[in-house]
Image: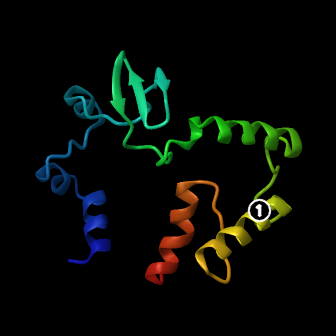
Amino acid sequence: MDLFEKCRRFASDPSMAESMGFPTNPQRAKELGVYAFFIPLDHTEGTEVEIEGRHLIMLGSNNYLGLTMDPSVRNAAVEAIREYGTSCTGSRFLNGTLALHGELEDRIAAYLGKEKALVFSTGFQTNLGVLPALVGR
């Protein structure tokens, strides 16, 4: 069975998930302490978080390098907000591409020795754009 079929079966057949030890009922997942959605973080320090007084390593973040808390990154973000505002006010496809996006993509492409690079704003958008291209679907 290929990967796509496994994913389809896992998502559509609760008995498959249950046989692998995954609770299929949200209430049961909460009872087991494994419900992973909408957990409020009391404090975050990039790669570590505090939840209900417990200090934990954050394994589910897109902040892989902990740069969101780096002082130089935070200062650069404040300067970017001062210059560009808090939003591009549109999608990159239509009217939300700034010259800054092109500069960043050109620098990334040059660094990687590639002709072009494309920056996505979220992990979800990256997966949505890249995975179908990689698997030809």
Q: In this view, does 5 lie above or below 64?
A: below
Up-down relation of residue 99 to residue 4 (above or below): above
Q: In which quarter of the image is residue 9?
A: bottom left
In the displayed image of the protein, which residue is found farthest to the right?
Answer: 83
Q: Residue at x 57, y 69 (%)?
A: 129
Q: Which residue is at 59% across, 54% downward?
A: 122
Determine if residue 27 is in view.
Answer: yes
Q: Quadrant of residue 109?
A: bottom right
* In the image, farthest residue toward the top: 53
- Residue 20 at what x, y percent from top left? 14, 52
Badge 1: residue crowd in 10 Å (few <14, some 14–19, many ≥20): some
Q: Where is residue 93 shown, x and y percent of the image?
A: 76, 67
Tally of marks: 1
The residue beneath circle 1 is 101
For residue 38, side relative to residue 112 (left or right): left
Q: Which of 34 and 66 is in front in this view?
A: 66
**Which percent across, then down, holds residue 26?**
30, 35
Residue 117 shows up from this direction: no
Left or right of residue 46, residue 33 in this image: left
Identify which residue is drawn at 65% across, 69% down.
108
Q: What residue type is labelled 1?
A: His
Judging depth in this view, the residue of 135 and 52 nearest the camera is 52
The colour scheme is rainbow
Left or right for 40, reference 54: right
Give percent across and percent down for residue 105. Answer: 71, 68
Q: Is residue 12 left or right of residue 137?
A: left
Location of the N terminus by quadrant is: bottom left
Task: Give the secondary structure at mark 1.
Answer: helix
